[in-house]
Amino acid sequence: MTQTGDNKYSMSELDKELLPLNVLLHCRTVVEGKNFVTTGIMTHLEGELFEVELPEYDQFELGENVKLTVYSPAGIQSMPSIVFAKYEGAIALLQPPDVQKRFKERREHPRVEISGNAQIMHVVSDSGEEMPLNNEAELTIHDISISGISFSGLDSPHFAAKSRLKAKIEIGFGFNCELEIVRRERHDNRMHCGAKMHVLEPEMLRPLRALILRQQVQKNAQSRKDHSRKRNFNG
């Protein structure tokens, strides 16, 4: 009993020692590459990406290993990273795997807008029995994350909340998944659903993650471009 209590105490104390990830946001950040060192500001934290704003963004190569030193209110935080993308005024970097061990927040899985379609193949009963569906209409995908998806289409009884379904997803590449409906609502005679998603083929998580990262980068780059255009317009 004493040992168990000590373990619980130790875990509680460990949790208290972890910092919130957003303590790094808006902090001065030194980026040290192979041949170049510069200082910028940590401007974005989302999913698996850091964004650091710096004028010398074009001095870094895509895929380059770098060292980040973040001067946060909670002290200096150093970590390795990799340059994933660069765009006007900033670089996007991959968060190292041990980030979630050092900071309180677990990485959220960001959803990105995406074009694609889904086909429901089976309804899964409470006992785990799979009942095949034939000639189901295609569903339109609106956004996706590593663990969730939203789509719309013709309504059907198997789109009730908490329904479990097996589906084929096509978003430029295809994969099979299991869905659990968590939200549904009606818009303009179409049913819109949000669902938890479990990818059934582990090897397909890699291209899905890469797609999400690319979409995040495109969104962030466009946001920076729009902000710069607006700032220039306003003088």
Image (cartoon, rainbow, N blue to C red):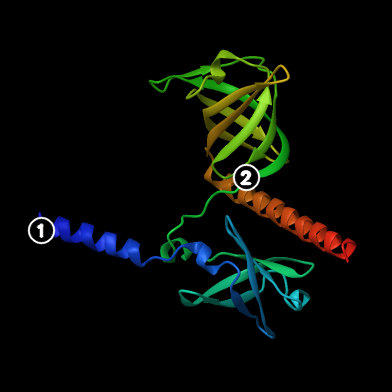
Question: Residue beneath label 2, please?
Answer: 111
Determine whether, in the image, residue 116 is placed left or right of residue 121: right
Mark 2–mark 1 Cα distance, whole angstroms, equals 44 Å
Location of the C terminus by quadrant is bottom right
Determine whether, in the image, residue 228 is placed left or right of residue 203: right
Query: Crowding at label 1, few (<14), some or many (≥20) Cα neighbours within 10 Å?
Result: few
Residue at 76% x, 56% y is: 223
* Residue 97 in view of the camera: no
Q: Quadrant of residue 120?
A: top right
Seen from the viewer's position, the closer of residues 200 and 117 is 117
Q: Quadrant of residue 5?
A: bottom left
Q: Are marks 2 and 1 in contact (CB under 8 Å)?
A: no
Q: What mark, if any, has residue 214 been given in the picture?
A: none
Q: Secondary structure at mark 2?
A: loop
Residue at 79% x, 60% y is: 227
Number of marks in picture: 2
Relative image position of residue 81 (x, y in whole percent): 58, 71
Relative image position of residue 71 (x, y in whole percent): 54, 78
Residue at 58% x, 31% y is: 194
Position of residue 73 relative to residue 233, above or below, is: below
Position of residue 125 relative to residue 26, above or below, is: above
The amino acid type, in three-letter code, at marker 2 is Arg
Location of the N terminus by quadrant is bottom left
The amino acid type, in three-letter code, at marker 1 is Thr
Determine whether, in the image, residue 91 is placed left or right of residue 13: right
Relative image position of residue 73 (x, y in whole percent): 49, 74
Determine whether, in the image, residue 18 is placed left or right of residue 45: left
Position of residue 176 relative to residue 110, above or below, is: above
Question: Residue beneath label 1, please?
Answer: 2
* Residue 139 in view of the camera: yes
Point out the tag, 2 or 1, that comes first from the N-terminus.
Answer: 1
Seen from the viewer's position, the closer of residues 109 and 25 is 25
